[in-house]
């Protein structure tokens, strides 16, 4: 086996480790005249998601929504997708076993579950945890609500046909206090490395990084902070233990004595894996979740800036050894421009956090920030995020938008409402055609499909289609059909006591399919 084949297998293995396990079957008979085969595209068979504890406010109300797009084939039958409190592991069951049971067996199981529910809760690590949210079928979301400050972190896994593209949304409304606002996030997949430009250790901010461990063994994480002059001194950011099936919030200002308004957070693990996300709260503008930036790259797109944004701040970090000289542009309704506030290239020193205040850059039209090498500049990888504010005076609300990759095959966002949702589609290069599917509602309704055309270099902001006869909330699935790359985001807005609360979630590709290289040998015997 040559090095190219080995490399392809390594890539497929890595993808499967991140997104799930790909279904692999024996290859077709080998054509002795062929020198290579096109890798097969197969659906993942397992996905994992983690949702942090939503709020410490007694006034909080959190809606969780779980959804898997319909239409993926070849992922087997049965399957499950469950989210449960992180205090203990989910019950380990094989969904395929249920299909083999007789009606009498199922009746016995139902009685056992009823008896178990009536029995006192067990103590210790062996206690079973009842799933909080269980998805039954692709194409129809399910939702649940928790009130108050005791809502736990959730861990979950999806298998079989419910795994490819599985997504969960956590949306919290807090009506008063420093954390007031609409706090939304797409629950994250576990990993070992995360970058969060746009965090802060300033006295006006309370930023917590939430570390959630889905596994049976403890994880150990390191948190490094980088300000405008480089690494912030910290004696407590290394070797943070995250017990099995637990979630640990870490207040960033306790890791360093240096107060800075713009900080980049790097979370990495020494052992195990975690889900990581930052909860940011400001004194005057409320709070929201800051998701991890896309992988470092020389170019980045940050979509979903509302047209009525009153303040936009770009935060960028260069994690490599080279400095970055960046051109900052805005892709709006009519085309791509260089805002007056970004007339000069943004210089980002290696290992240092840089920021640029863009003001009310959108001027009434939704848009996306594009960054890339300035003329004559190096192709230096960077990570980036936006801090976005709507409203003025005492009626302000903040949200965060990380750099996000293009939707290569499919992306989904859950918990859309009949009113208040805005979908933005940015085609930074060539024009593109995009199919958008509004799923059935969590309480009823029929899916609706609509196609949009996005001109190259522009951002299209639309009120997304709403399912016919909608009851409850629904999911939006974006699938490019032709043309250049497309970056997508969804804004959800709610007005509470005159305050324009909002949150923005980007739509990275769901990686529900993986490429499995064809081989000249049947490796199924090597188990």
Image: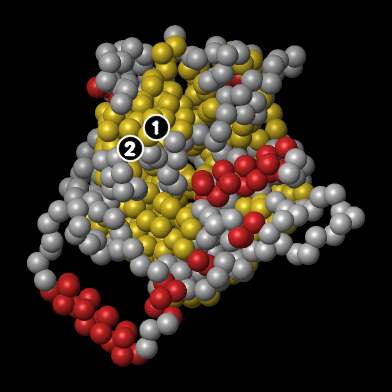
Q: Residue at x 13, y 61 (%)?
A: 122
Label 2, residues with CA under 10 Å away: few <14, some 14-19, many ≥20? many
Q: CA distance from mark 1 to mark 2?
A: 7 Å
Query: What numbered label is drawn on residue 219?
Result: 2
Say whether marks 1 and 2 touch (CB < 8 Å).
yes
Badge 2 marks a residue whose secondary structure is strand
- x and y percent of residue 34 in the render? 87, 54
- x and y percent of residue 46 in the render? 48, 58
- x and y percent of residue 513 in the render? 61, 55
* Quadrant in the rendering for residue 132: bottom left
According to the image, label 1 marks what residue? 269
Q: Residue furthest bottom?
A: 104
Q: Residue at x 48, y 17 (%)?
A: 353
Q: Is residue 226 above or below residue 446?
A: above
Quarter of the image with the N terminus is top right
Q: Residue furthest right?
A: 33
- Quick one: 101 or 385, which is closer to the camera? 101
| 342 sits left or right of 157 in the view | right
* Residue 149 is at least partly visible in this image: yes
Q: Earlier in the sequence, mark 1 or mark 2?
A: 2
């Amino acid at each position: 086996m040559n090095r190219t084949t080995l490399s392809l297998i390594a890539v497929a293995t890595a993808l499967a480790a991140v997104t799930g396990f790909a279904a692999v079957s024996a290859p077709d008979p080998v054509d002795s005249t062929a020198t290579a085969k096109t890798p097969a595209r197969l659906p993942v068979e397992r996905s994992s998601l983690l949702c942090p504890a939503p709020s410490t406010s007694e006034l909080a109300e959190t809606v969780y929504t779980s959804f898997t797009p319909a239409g993926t084939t070849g992922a087997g039958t049965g399957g499950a997708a469950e989210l449960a409190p992180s205090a203990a592991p989910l019950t380990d069951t094989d969904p395929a076993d249920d299909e083999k049971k007789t009606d009498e067996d199922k009746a016995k199981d139902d009685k056992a579950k009823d008896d178990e529910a009536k029995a006192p809760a067990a103590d210790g690590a062996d206690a079973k945890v009842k799933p909080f949210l269980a998805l039954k079928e692709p194409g129809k979301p399910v939702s649940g609500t928790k009130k108050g400050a005791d809502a736990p972190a959730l861990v979950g896994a999806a298998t079989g046909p419910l795994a490819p593209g599985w997504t969960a949304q956590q949306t919290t409304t807090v009506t008063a206090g420093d954390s007031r606002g609409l706090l939304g996030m797409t629950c994250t997949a576990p990993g070992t490395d995360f970058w969060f430009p746009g965090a802060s250790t300033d006295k006006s901010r309370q930023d917590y990084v939430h570390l959630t461990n889905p596994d049976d063994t403890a994880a150990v994480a390191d948190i490094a902070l980088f300000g405008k002059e480089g690494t912030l001194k910290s004696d407590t950011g290394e070797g943070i233990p995250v017990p099995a099936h637990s979630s640990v919030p870490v207040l960033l200002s306790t890791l360093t004595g240096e107060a800075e308004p713009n900080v980049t957070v790097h979370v990495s693990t020494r052992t195990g894996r975690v889900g990581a996300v930052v909860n940011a709260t400001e004194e005057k503008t409320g709070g929201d979740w800051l998701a991890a930036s896309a992988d470092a790259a020389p170019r980045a797109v940050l979509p979903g800036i509302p047209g009525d944004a009153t303040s936009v701040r770009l935060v960028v970090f260069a994690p490599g050894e080279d400095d970055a000289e960046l051109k900052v542009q805005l892709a709006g309704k009519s085309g791509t421009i260089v805002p007056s506030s970004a007339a000069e290239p943004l210089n980002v020193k290696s290992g240092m956090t840089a920021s640029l205040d863009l003001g009310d850059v959108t001027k009434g039209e939704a848009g996306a920030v594009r960054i890339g090498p300035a003329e004559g500049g190096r192709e230096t990888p960077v990570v980036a995020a936006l801090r976005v504010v709507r409203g003025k005076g005492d009626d302000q609300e903040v949200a965060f938008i990380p750099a996000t990759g293009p939707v290569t095959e499919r992306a989904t966002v859950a918990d859309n409402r009949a009113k208040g949702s805005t979908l933005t589609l940015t085609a930074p290069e060539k024009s593109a055609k995009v199919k958008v599917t509004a799923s059935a509602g969590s309480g009823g309704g029929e899916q609706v499909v609509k196609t949009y055309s996005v001109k190259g270099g522009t951002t299209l902001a639309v009120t997304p289609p709403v399912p016919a006869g909608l009851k409850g909330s629904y999911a939006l699935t974006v699938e490019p059909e032709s043309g250049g790359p497309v970056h997508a985001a969804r804004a959800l807005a709610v007005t509470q006591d005159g305050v324009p609360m909002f949150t923005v979630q980007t739509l990275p590709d769901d990686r529900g399919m993986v490429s499995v290289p064809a081989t000249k040998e049947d490796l199924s015997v090597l188990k």
